[in-house]
Image (cartoon, helix red, strand yellow):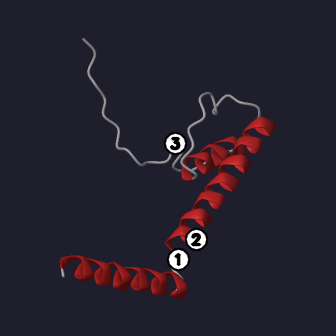
Amino acid sequence: MSPKLYLPIGTKPFIQPRTEREELVNRLWNARYAVPGAKQMEIEQLRDFVDYAEGRAAEDNAKIALEKTRTKQDIDNAVAFLKEYQAWRNKKRG
């Protein structure tokens, strides 16, 4: 039986990249994309994957930031709805 090797999660594939390929693989890791065979892939294809992954990550971050922002109008609408609901509930209870 071979021993199991537990590697820490979260370390970059190449701690000190020496080639462009290693740098591109690290950039894929930073964008949280796993591409099987990335270490043996052609450089041009790997660049395309990195560009796509970084663009997609930027889009996702922008969507999350937009969803988190609340405008004053959203807050006012929520307050108005809660007041209307409370008035309806009080009226229903009598």
Residue that mark 3 sits on = 13
In front: 11, or 64?
Answer: 64
Most distant residue in the left direction: 93
Relative to residue 78, is residue 31 depicted above or below? above
Drawn side of residue 52 relative to residue 11, left or right = right
Residue on which the image places disc 2: 66
Structural distance between the alpha carbons of marks 3 and 2: 32 Å
Front-most of residues 58 and 72: 72
| In the displayed structure image, the side of residue 31 where residue 83 appears, left or right | left
Position of residue 64 measured from the top left corner of the image (x, y, whole percent): 54, 64
Residue at 63 percent of width and 32 percent of height: 39
Q: Is residue 68 above or below residue 63?
A: below
Q: Quadrant of residue 8?
A: top left
Say which of marks 3 and 1 sits in front.
Answer: 1
Q: Is residue 38 above or below residue 84?
A: above
**Element on which disc 1 rests:** loop
- Mark 3 surroundings: few (<14), some (14-19) or many (≥20) residues within 10 A: some
Near-viewer residue (53 or 66): 66
